[in-house]
Every structure is written in structure tokens, then in C-alpha cells.
Image: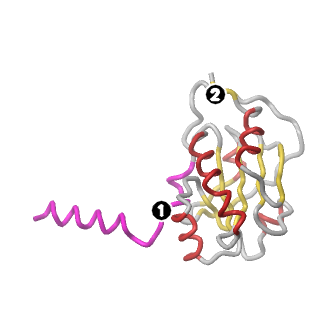
Amino acid sequence: MKRLLAALLLLVAACSPESPRGGRQALPGPAPAGVSYPDVKGASAPKLTLSLVDGTRVSTEDLWRDRPLVLLFFSSWCGKCAEAQPDFTALAEKHRDAVAFLGVAGRDSDRDLRRYLDEHRVSYPVARDDAEQSAGRAFALREPPLVAVVAKGGALVKGWPGGTNANAVAAELAALFHQR
């Protein structure tokens, strides 16, 4: 009976409306062995400290310290964002730990954001921009989507106001790390 009750509690917890997607469990682990990152010079990307959807504080500087970082600014109501999301999720999963991905959601209710993360099976961490859209403004975001690639160490490599596709991001990443 105790085992049945424990199994039922686990099932209820797994079906909870509180989405675990986008929180600290999605942060990258250590950079994999056998991956090297060239030094890239250029203008520094803006440093941000944000709260993930589960309240965990994260710094872009910490994320790009050991690997490149892809920033994806989006909103749940953005059709272009939703259209590109499956490909970005696949790209993040393909490069798991070798490249950090961070979504930054702006102007979303908690409910709409959770629904978006679940519907699109977002596998990387997601932070919320503040009411003033400070993170978006730091990257000159006018309206989502915006994608930015930052090299290991913080050099801004490329940004796409208005978004881009995952293939364009993958092409930029190809020059930023090498797997042996």
C-alpha cells in the first residue's frame, strides 16, 4: 500500500501544473572533454544578471566564461518565435554543455510562459526580463525575436534583430568551438 501511495504521489508531482522547464536543471554542466574554444576578439556583449523561471539567479558572464552563449529573446505571443522554437530546442540539445543557451522572455504572464515552454518542449534555461525590459534594451531589442551569439569570454559575435533560423546560428557556432 505504501508503494502504491508513493507511486501515486510521484505521478501527481510529474503532472503538476508547475513546469520545471527553463529552470536551474536546464543549466549546462561542465564543458565536455575534447572541446576547444578559440579566442575571439571584439566588442563585449552586455553583462546581464537575470532570474530563471524557477527564481535561480544566473549571470551571462558566468555562462560565457567556459563556452559560447546563444541568447534567444522571445515572448509567448510572438508567432515568429514559436515557429523557430523547435529548431532552437534541437540545436540546444545537439550542443548541450558545449554551448550555453539562455532564453529571455519578455512581457509574458507566468501562465503563458509556462504554457509556451511546455508546448515547445524548451530544454534550455529561460529567464524573465524585468518590467522595464532592461535585458532586451541592453541588446537593442525593439520587439522579439532577437538572437545573439556570444563567444567564450564575452565577445559579441553576431546578433539578429527580428530573429533568424537555427541553421544561421549553427553556422556561427561552427567557428566558435571544435570537438575532437
Query: Residue 62, relative to residue 33: is it above or below?
Result: below
How many numbered callouts? 2
Distance from disc 2 to disc 1, alpha carbons, whole Å, reads: 29 Å
Residue 73's disc number: none
**Label 1 belongs to which residue?**
20
Quarter of the image for residue 16 reads bottom left
Question: Which residue type carries mark 1?
Answer: Pro
Left or right of residue 73, residue 21 in this image: left
Secondary structure at numbered mark 2: strand
Quadrant in the rendering for residue 115: bottom right
Q: Give the image location of residue 75, x and y in percent.
A: 69, 69
**Category of crowding for the residue at label 1, using alpha-carbon neighbours closer than 10 angstroms: few (below 14), some (14–19), many (at least 20):** some
Residue at figure coordinates x 83%, y 51% from the top left: 159
What x and y, as percent, mark residue 95?
Answer: 61, 39
In percent of the image, x 84 and y 68: which residue is there? 142
Q: Is residue 7 magenta?
A: yes
Q: Residue at x 51, y 64 (%)?
A: 118
Residue at image position (29%, 63%) is 10
Residue 13, horizontal then vertical, whole percent:
34, 66
* Residue stretch rendered in magenta on the structure: 1-27
Left-right relation of 130 to 114: right
